[in-house]
Image (tube, helix red, strand yellow):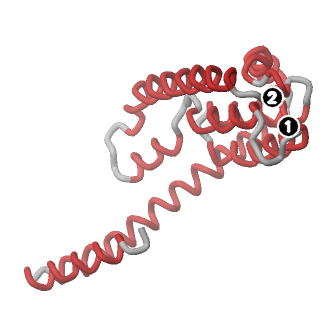
Amino acid sequence: MNYLWPILILISLLFSIFRGTIQDINNSIFTSISDVVTLSLTLVGNMCLWCGLMKIVQETSIIKFLNKLLNPILKWLYPDSKENKEAMKAISINTISNFLGIGNAATPAGLKAMEELEKENMNKSELSNSMIMLIVLNTTSIQLIPTTVIAIRASLGSPNPSQIIIPIWISTIVGTLTGILITKILLRRRKI
């Protein structure tokens, strides 16, 4: 990639010089910079809102209620770690954050869960089954509200930025269930 991008940029510049459209490139650079700043501010505002909301949820009894709802599922998904209360709490917060579409708030909880799972991992050279499942679920996570995608679509002037919610529900549910199924099958064959 370190070579590919400079080559593509150089080819584009040479092509624009020969076609006489170098002014269009200059104009698009400044337009793109403006668009990037607008998009960045939109995403930062979105991230602050949802991270703040998640922090409020963590400090209230709502998180206890959500933990109780998720507990049976999480015990099934992480049978090796169901007694590790700190890990299960962090996994629960990570799962809830991902479900609400706020991956930025999910990251600290995911890192905390990995730290806790690493403490109980006997073979430090390999990931434990619970660590593997956490990675799979963190990657595929079902999203109720895809806040980042909606914010990007809104910042780019989409007339209906939330139109993609149902397709995202379908794709994340299918992806998550597939990930769980394949991971469970492969972990049964594993000797850890």
Nearest to the observer: residue 70 or residue 186: 186
Where does the N terminus fall, quadrant-wise? bottom left
Relative horizontal placement of residue 191, taking residue 49 as reference (left or right): right
Where does the C terminus fall, quadrant-wise? top right
Nearest to the observer: residue 24 or residue 177: 177
Q: Residue furthest left?
A: 19
Q: Look at the picture and state if 122 lies above or below 67.
A: below
What residue is pinned by disc 1?
59
Relative horizontal placement of residue 163, taking residue 81 as reference (left or right): left
Q: Residue at coordinates 51% horizontally, 45% vertically from top-left?
A: 148
Q: Residue at coordinates 40% horizontally, 27% vertically from top-left?
A: 167
Q: Which mark is residue 93?
A: none
Residue 27 percent location from the top left of the image: 25, 77
- Contact between marks 1 and 2 (CB within 8 A): the answer is yes
Amino acid tagged 2 = Ile
Q: Total number of numbered labels?
A: 2
What residue is pinned by disc 2?
63
Q: Residue at coordinates 91% horizontally, 24% vertically from top-left?
A: 83
Binning the other alpha carbons within 10 Å of mark 1 as few (below 14), some (14 to 19) or many (20 upward) gives few
Q: Residue at coordinates 62% horizontally, 43% vertically from top-left?
A: 103
User: In whole angstroms, how far apart are the C-alphas of marks 1 and 2?
Assistant: 8 Å
SS state under label 2: helix
Q: Quadrant of residue 138 in the image?
A: top right
Residue 71 percent location from the top left of the image: 80, 19
Amino acid tagged 1 = Glu
Binning the other alpha carbons within 10 Å of mark 2 as few (below 14), some (14 to 19) or many (20 upward) gives some
Relative horizontal placement of residue 189, taking residue 179 as reference (left or right): right
Residue 40 percent location from the top left of the image: 50, 61
Q: Quadrant of residue 117 in the image?
A: top right
SS state under label 1: helix
Residue 191 percent location from the top left of the image: 75, 28
